[in-house]
Amino acid sequence: MKITIIKGDITKIKADAIVNAAGVGFGNAIGGGVAGAIRRAAGLELVKECRQLSKDKYPNGLPTGEAVITKAYNLPAKIIIHTVGPRYYSEDINLLKNCYVNCLNLAEENNCESIAFPAISTGAFGCPIEKSAEIVKEILENFKSEIIKEVILVLFDEGDLGVYNGKLPEGH
Ligand code: ADP
C-alpha cells in the first residue's frame, strides 16, 4: 500500500472511501470537526441514512473502535466509513487501532483501492498528534492488502502534517 500524507479537507478527497471521525450518535453529527464537514458536504441524505442505521443497528450508538459504511452522496468518494475514536482522557487509546483496522477491513470488503483517513481522535477527543502518528504507523506497517493500493492520511493543519511527515514513511 502506498502511503500519501497531505494537508487538506477530507471532504474534497477523491478516494474510493473516506473515513469519518464520528461521534457515538453518528447519525446526528452536528457542529465542527470532520463529522460536521462531512455532513455539510455530503448533504441531508447522509443524515437520513445514518439515522436509519442508528435506529436499526446501533440504538445505543456505534461502539468505540467499530466502523460502519454508508453511501457518500455529494462527496467525490464512493463510500464513507464512519468510526468512533476513543476519547483520550477517558478511554483506552489502543481502541484507536481498532478504528484503523476496522476501516481498512471494510474498505477491502467493499473493493476500495484507496482510502483517506483524518487523524481520528485528535480533535475534540483530545489525542496528541504524536500518539496518533505512532498508532497509524504501527497499523499501516502491519496491514497487508491485495486490494487497497493507496492510503491517504489527511491532516488539517501544518503542525499536524509536520508530525506525521516526521514519523511516517511515505511511499511503500
Ligand atoms: P475526534 O472527535 O475524533 O477528535 P475531530 O473531527 O474533532 O474528531 O478531529 C479529528 C482531526 O481532524 C483533528 O486533527 C482536526 O483538526 C481534523 N479535521 C477537522 N476538520 C477536518 C477536515 N474537514 N478534513 C480533515 N481533517 C479535519
Image (tube, helix red, strand yellow):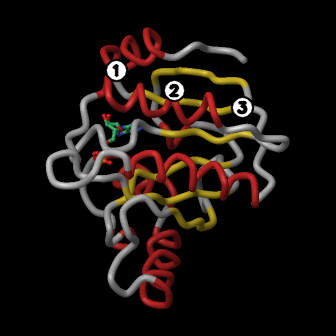
**In the image, residue 160 above or below residue 15:** above
Q: Amino acid at mark 1?
A: Asp
- Separation of marks 1 and 2 at Cα, in angstroms: 14 Å
Q: Quadrant of ligand 1?
A: top left
Q: Residue at x 78, y 34 (%)?
A: 149
Crowding near pointer 3: few (<14 within 10 Å), some, many (20+)?
many
The front one of 115 and 102 is: 102
Q: Nearer the viewer, mark 1 or mark 2?
A: 2
- Separation of marks 1 and 3 at Cα, in angstroms: 20 Å
Q: Secondary structure at mark 1?
A: helix
**Mark 1 near ligand 1 (CB under 8 Å)?**
yes
- Looking at the picture, how far across and down is residue 96, in whole percent? 40, 47
- Work out whether mark 1 precedes mark 3 in sequence or the reverse, and give the earlier one: 3
Name the residue tied to disc 1. Answer: 160
Crowding near pointer 2: few (<14 within 10 Å), some, many (20+)?
some
The front one of 8 and 69 is: 69
The front one of 163 and 131 is: 131
Name the residue tied to disc 3. Answer: 150
Is 44 positioned to the left or the right of 149 in the image?
Answer: left
**In the image, residue 109 above or below residue 11:** below
Quadrant in the rendering for residue 166: top left
**In the image, residue 50 above or below residue 93:** below
Q: Residue at x 60, y 32 (%)?
A: 140
Q: Secondary structure at mark 2?
A: helix
Quarter of the rendering occupied by the N terminus: top right
Q: Residue at x 52, y 39 (%)?
A: 117
Disc assigned to residue 1:
none
- Looking at the picture, how far across and down is residue 159, in whole percent? 30, 15
Name the residue tied to disc 2. Answer: 137
Q: Amino acid at mark 2?
A: Lys
